[in-house]
Image (cartoon, rainbow, N blue to C red):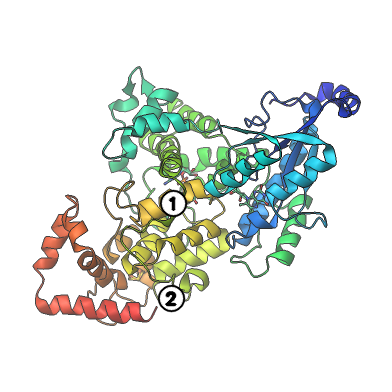
Amino acid sequence: MFGPTQANRCSVQVRCQSYAVLMPKQLILILGDQLTPDISSLQDADPASSIVLIAEVMAEASYVRHHKKKIAFLFSAMRHFADELRAAGWMVEYTRLDDPENSGSLVGEVFRVAAQNGATSVRVTEPGEWRLLDELQGLDAAFAVEILPDDRFIASHKEFEDWAEGRKALRMEYFYRDMRRKTDILMDGDKPTGGQWNFDHDNRKPAARDLMMPQPLRFTPDAITQDVLDLVEARFADNFGTLNPFRFGATRADAEAAFAHFLKTALPQFGDYQDAMLAAEKFLYHAVVGLYLNCGLLNPLTICRAAEAEYDAGRAPLNAVEGFIRQIIGWREYVRGIYWREGPDYVRRNALGATRALPSFYWDAKTDMACVRSCVEQTRDEAYAHHIQRLMVTGNFALLAGVDPYALHEWYLAVYADAYEWVEAPNVVGMSQFADGGLLASKPYISSGAYIDRMSDYCRGCKYDVKEKAGAKACPFNYLYWDFIVRHRERVASNPRMAQMVRNYDRFTDERKAEIKADSAQFLGQL
Ligand code: FAD
Ligand code: DLZ
Ligand code: SF4
């Protein structure tokens, strides 16, 4: 903790008052996803001559129509964090959304609060979006601006650049190995613990309905959260999502308790069932900590070390612990590296030329496809879906149907409580939609209904028949899969991991090919 301690808080306040006229004040802007007491903007800062600004602003709350639960979670976490900083001795100016003086934007709030406090310099940790970086850099016309690296990440921008430099393909696996070496997590000297870097082949089990499922730790809203819930209900009534019941935690202590609960109840089976989906079990063995990590209530390295300690103590197997750690020091760091390396136009990439409007059932769940319906309903109710639901149901459908990746990107950015552009965009544009042409994924993540049937129980409750290949009863994923192969034939044929699919298609009879075309046109025409 970098703030002054409780013991010296009074003397700090006294010093502040006497310095106020003598020293130019520095304004430290803390963004909504920077709720970390030792964030770089607070490190080495002098609480006596600094004003910390945290602001709820409409510009941030409306650049996409965020899920109601996402806004409520973040505003409540921001308000709790302001109290945490005040308790540590910082002077905090907190702008509430409904404050009559609220200028509506972060830059506007910097000007307003700086003027009120006589601040001439602004300090901020780099934001997680190009849009905001651009806005904050623009402050330098009026202030001495210091934008600091975000050292909560394990790899700096430079480290990622250096790693990527000169490589033909930027595969996560090799980057991940470097992160293992750098952090010394799950390492025996210079060798990976257990003799293997990756235990993914053990992690593909479908889940049985009769398994005892853990549930993530849920919290009862306190007075601060309740105030925010009232605000969100009043100001964002038309946004997507169910607000109540609201069960996310909002403090660091809540986030730590939620993570400790995951370690105890779910981590040992995290690996086995990582790719499984069950309609009635929304969380399976996932950690449900993305929202806490991404806004700064949990630290990535700390939680990875805690997971490693579970393995060391014999309480969780290696495939589970390695799988969990890989998601964080591997995937999470890697997608951030890609986001910043590829530049602001990355979110607009559309290598497959997909132009279809986002179907309305992504918002209202009105579709006969039970898998998509279930994932959208769950997203609406929880502001959460786990990785395979995002990738192999809603993402897979959009890819097969040729949905405009930018429209889909905006949907994913809006609907999940853990969504910030630096992490969402590479997952959607790159991993899920192949819209970056294969920079991130080695092949398009497409599947027919058979994969969804194998990994879930959705098909049992579906109007469509997953075994049917053609006709009105057939699972749409089945013919849309082949339609995708035909539409992108050349690209697929040149991919060693998929070329076989083109050869399989070529062996179909003309009649079968005509069915695929007609069923696809009929289904897509109704969207
Ligand atoms: P767990 O499955 O328990 O995994 C633990 C942690 O690992 C996660 O909290 C997360 O921090 C990290 N992680 C896992 N997979 C990834 C990944 N592919 N990229 C980055 N971090 C990862 N993650 C986000 O944090 N924000 C997003 O907006 C987001 N959008 C996504 C969109 C699509 C289309 C896809 C396919 C994935 C997306 N992910 C996103 C990654 C992943 O789905 C979520 O991190 C995960 O579902 C969060 O739930 P959890 O905390 O239960 O994760
Ligand atoms: C997502 C979000 C929302 C809904 N509201 C705010 C806000 O009012 N104030 C704020 O500082 N940040 C908010 N955020 C997060 C930002 O939009 C942005 O994603 C991150 O700050 C990028 O680092
Ligand atoms: Fe989804 Fe097809 Fe299964 Fe229906 S049959 S749930 S559409 S995969």
In the picture as drawn, the residue positioned furthest to the top comes out as 189
Kindly identify which residue carries mark 1. Answer: 345
Sequence-first disc among 1 and 2: 1
Quarter-of-image position of residue 2: top right
Q: Which mark is residue 10?
A: none
Q: Which residue is rendered at x = 75% and y = 61% of the image? A: 230
Observer able to see residue 319: yes
Where is residue 501 shown, x and y percent of the image?
A: 16, 60
- Please state the quadrant of the image where ligand 3 appears: bottom left
* Viewer-proximal residue among 461 and 294: 294
Q: Residues within 10 Å of mark 2 (few under 14, many from 20)?
A: some
Quarter-of-image position of residue 11: top right
Kindly identify which residue carries mark 2. Answer: 367
35 versus 446 height, above or below: above
Where is residue 53 shown, x and y percent of the image?
A: 74, 41
* 129 left or right of 207 in image: right
15 versus 207 height, above or below: above
Which quarter of the figure is the C terminus placed in? bottom left
What kind of residue is marked 2? Thr
Q: Which residue is rendered at x = 37% and y = 55% of the image? A: 432
Is the CB atom of the residue marked by disc 2 within 8 angstroms of ligand 3's nearest atom?
Answer: no
Observer able to see residue 212: no
- Say what secondary structure mark 2 lies in: loop
